[in-house]
Amino acid sequence: MYLGLDLGTSALKALLLDADQRVVAVVSEPLAIRRPQPLWSEQDPDQWWTALDHALLRLRELHPAPMAAVCALGLAGQMHGAVLLGADDRVLRPAILWNDGRSAAQCDEFSAALPALAAIAGNLAMPGFTAPKLLWVRAHEREVFAATAKVLLPKDWLRLRLSGEHATDCSDASGTLWLDVGRRCWSEELLAVCGLGLEHMPRLVEGSDVAGRLRPVLADRWGLPAGVPIAGGGGDNAASAVGLGIANANEGFVSLGTSGVVFLASDRHRPRPDAAVHAFCHALPGRWHQMSVMLSAMSALHWARVLLGLASEAALLDCAESLDASRRERAPLFLPYLGGERTPHHDADAKGVLFGLAHEHDAAAIAHAVVEGVTFGLLDGWQALAALPGAVDSLMLVGGGANNAGWARMLASAFGVPIEVAAESAAAGALGAARLAALAAGGDPAEFCRRPDVAREFRPDEGEAALLQARHARFRALYPTLARSFKAGPER
């Protein structure tokens, strides 16, 4: 048996996988975000540990025999978060998360201090990345910065608690802006700009390497064998790719999580900082990937369903589907930039907009506009990746919105490629973590990186594609028209 742990933004998932790659069980524990000031997004790491403990105690209660047979553990997690530790490994402040936007000024500072930044890191400086967060702490919380002995990413703080090891993998480290992504090693030049050195960084491993062993007291508490090896693991999207068997060039997926992602695997480092595309190491050795990221995907649906008084995001999607074709053509447009945007605009000041409201528009029209707006944000990212025509045969769909057939059909028509959904798509990150655990335990990569069975396939529809193309052109025209107004808002 293999155990995969996926530390998301809104939940922690734990998954048990057997040697035949059958998912035995998945449990989930919710997480909450603190937003003490505008643009801020934080979590207390102790909340992650409590969620992990609850999840594994539940698995022990429900599946004691599989837990006792676990031979390796893998970690996946939300990227970019900054967990600052003192010399005694004590957490110095709440973790600053990937969707925190306070460090825009520090991004400018970083870029000005090192013009070669994008050439080394393969990426632009954006508030979501880890390095600008440390520059913000250095400027605004000097005592905390001075006391910082180690900086860990969220899943790697869990590893520290699990094993006592300071370690991270190349895929997650790619999102710090301290990694030379092409060479897969820490860059002393990038670290020095932030007043840090190699001693502040965890040990760097590949995702399929052993990066620690489970403490005996924890193994006893959760009914696991003593000394279980812990794999390096991966950032959430790279781990999801492993879970979906996406390892080769031009294989990819669309993720409908809190944020929205379009992911394409590559056999080489292919940076595109001019298009605000992320170029990261894959969780598998010798492989890389490109990724477009929008900051508000399912989080935009959550905002809209609360606004409309609906019971769930599923109810919002059902409401959106109730709109017929003629009313969709006249629906308002929605810019989904509720927390700024990354790809392609690289604009922390961008705001959400409902444009073109009229008396005729009801809850269904607004719900449709929000779902369509997130689709268009993902389409912008897909186009920014600049995949060659015909190079991508299909894209897998994962995340919280992957179970909605209407949305999958819309994405297929918008992107112009078939969209495939696997049975375990909602837990792809945890599945990828479990597969990386299997590789760390000596498993065959050909076996543990295979594509899962496709449960459903959605092909582009010409009529819907034409409607979406016309509305996307109007959507694309809104941002440059409004960008200056976004920047005229209140000071940070």
Image (tube, grey):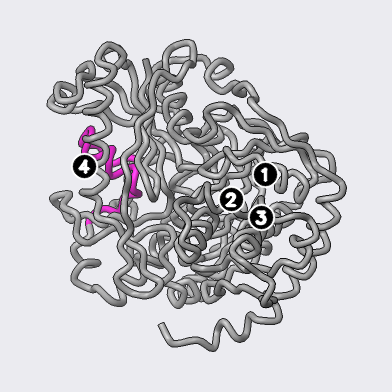
**Tag 3 near tag 4, CB within 8 Å:** no
Closer to the chain start, of discs 3 and 1, is: 3
Mark 3 lies on residue: 375
At mark 3, the secondary structure is helix
Three-letter amino acid code at the position of disc 1 = Gly
Closer to the chain start, of discs 1 and 2, is: 2
The image shows residue 296, relative to residue 115, as above or below, that is above
Using the rendered view, name the quadrant where residue 405 is placed. top right
**Tag 1 near tag 4, CB within 8 Å:** no
Closer to the chain start, of discs 1 and 4, is: 4
Answer whether residue 26 is visible to the viewer in this image. yes
Residue at image coords 13%, 50%: 88
Residue at image coords 40%, 24%: 437
CA neighbours of label 2 inside 10 A, class few (<14), some (14 to 19), many (20+)? many
Q: CA distance from mark 2 to mark 4?
A: 32 Å
Across and down, in percent, residue 389 comes to 84, 45
Magenta highlight range: 149-167
Three-letter amino acid code at the position of disc 2 = Leu
User: Which disc is residue 23 wearing?
Assistant: none
